[in-house]
Image: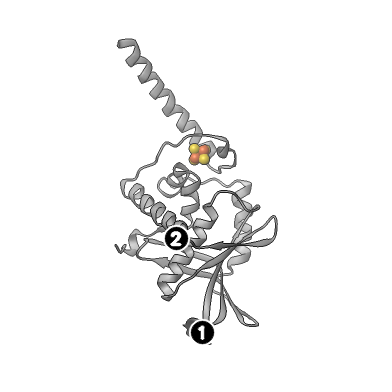
């Protein structure tokens, strides 16, 4: 399957979608957005990393910031914080740079490494876009966390790639239907930038449901 460019979804939405499908739909379908300190801190880190389109050479490494990427097979587009190109005789050729290079994407994140794989999925989606655009294979990349200030390497395994493809497919299905799922509230909502928008709405819906259920019980 190949998506039309007009139907591409934002690559960065994958982490929202995996964190909470409702949060993703509120942001990407209903265009609701609220800053909280987590997103603000994340944006500052991203601004530092992006510096769009700049290229720097350090020894045998080329560093590109803010590289725009897309994939017609996944139907997503976005921007990589940093892509490093390492000299590698099995790598690919680049215009304007002699030699052959392997590709290594790096994504900047606030906080410290998390047990969930949301950040890994976003990085893997970037790698899948780069693979399609540059016709190469990328085996791993890295996440750089602001709190610990070090890289965590991520291997783009078959299962990680499959979870990215499945999430993106589901995102397209929701988006084409304009569907905002209900989702459950829980401890994870504490760090959600949309809780003030989402929870009162969920509670209202729940109370209507409870009212209907109660009315049905009374009449049965
Ligand atoms: S408040 Fe909770 S349920 Fe609502 S969007 Fe945020 S994480 Fe999802």
Give whichever of discs 1 and 2 has the lower sequence position.
1
Q: At x 53% / y 63%, what residue is drawn?
A: 155
Q: Residues within 10 Å of mark 1 (few under 14, many from 20)?
A: some
Quadrant that contains the C terminus: top left
Q: The residue tagged with tag 1: helix, strand or loop? A: strand
Task: Give x and y (percent) for residue 184.
Answer: 47, 34
Residue with the mark numbered 2:
158
Q: Which numbered circle lies on residue 39?
A: none
State left or right for residue 94 relative to residue 190.
left
In the displayed structure, 60 sits above or below 22; it is below
Q: At x 49% / y 31%, what residue is drawn?
A: 200
In the displayed structure, 26 sits above or below 203; it is below
Task: Give x and y (percent) for residue 140.
Answer: 53, 67
- Confirm or reject: label 1 Cβ below 8 Å from ligand 1: no
State left or right for residue 201 relative to residue 65.
left
Camera-nearest residue between 177 and 103 = 103
Q: Residues within 10 Å of mark 2 (few under 14, many from 20)?
A: few
Is label 1 in contact with label 2 (beta carbons under 8 Å)? no
Task: Give x and y (percent) for residue 102.
Answer: 52, 77
Q: The residue tagged with tag 2: helix, strand or loop? A: helix
- Image quadrant of residue 5? bottom left
Here the colouring is one colour
Task: Give x and y (percent) for residue 187.
Answer: 58, 36
Label 1 to label 2, Cα distance in Å? 26 Å
- Confirm or reject: label 2 Cβ below 8 Å from ligand 1: no
Q: Which numbered circle lies on residue 100?
A: 1
- Image quadrant of residue 53? bottom right
Camera-nearest residue between 163 and 118 = 163
Pick out the residue farthest to the front.
158
In the displayed structure, 168 sits above or below 73; it is above
Pick out the residue farthest to the right.
148
Q: At x 62% / y 82%, what residue is drawn?
A: 60
């Amino acid at each position: 399957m190949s998506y039309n460019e007009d139907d591409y979804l934002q690559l960065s939405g994958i982490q929202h979608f995996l964190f909470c499908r409702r949060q993703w739909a509120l942001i990407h379908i209903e265009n609701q957005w609220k800053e909280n300190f987590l997103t603000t801190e994340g944006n500052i880190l991203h601004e530092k990393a992006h510096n769009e389109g700049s290229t720097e050479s350090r020894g045998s490494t080329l560093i590109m910031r803010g590289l725009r990427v897309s994939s017609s097979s996944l139907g997503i587009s976005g921007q990589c914080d940093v892509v490093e190109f390492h000299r590698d005789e099995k790598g690919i050729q680049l215009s304007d740079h002699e030699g052959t290079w392997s590709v290594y994407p790096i994504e900047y994140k606030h906080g410290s490494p998390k047990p969930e794989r949301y950040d890994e999925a976003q990085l893997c989606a970037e790698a899948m876009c780069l693979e399609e655009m540059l016709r190469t294979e990328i085996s791993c990349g890295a996440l750089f966390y602001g709190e610990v200030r070090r890289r965590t390497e991520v291997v783009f395994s078959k299962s990680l790639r499959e979870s990215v493809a499945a999430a993106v497919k589901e995102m397209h299905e929701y988006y084409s239907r304009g569907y905002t799922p209900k989702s459950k509230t829980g401890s994870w909502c504490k760090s959600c930038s949309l809780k003030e928008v989402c929870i009162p709405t969920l509670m209202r819906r729940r109370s209507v449901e409870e009212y209907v259920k109660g009315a049905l019980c009374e009449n049965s």
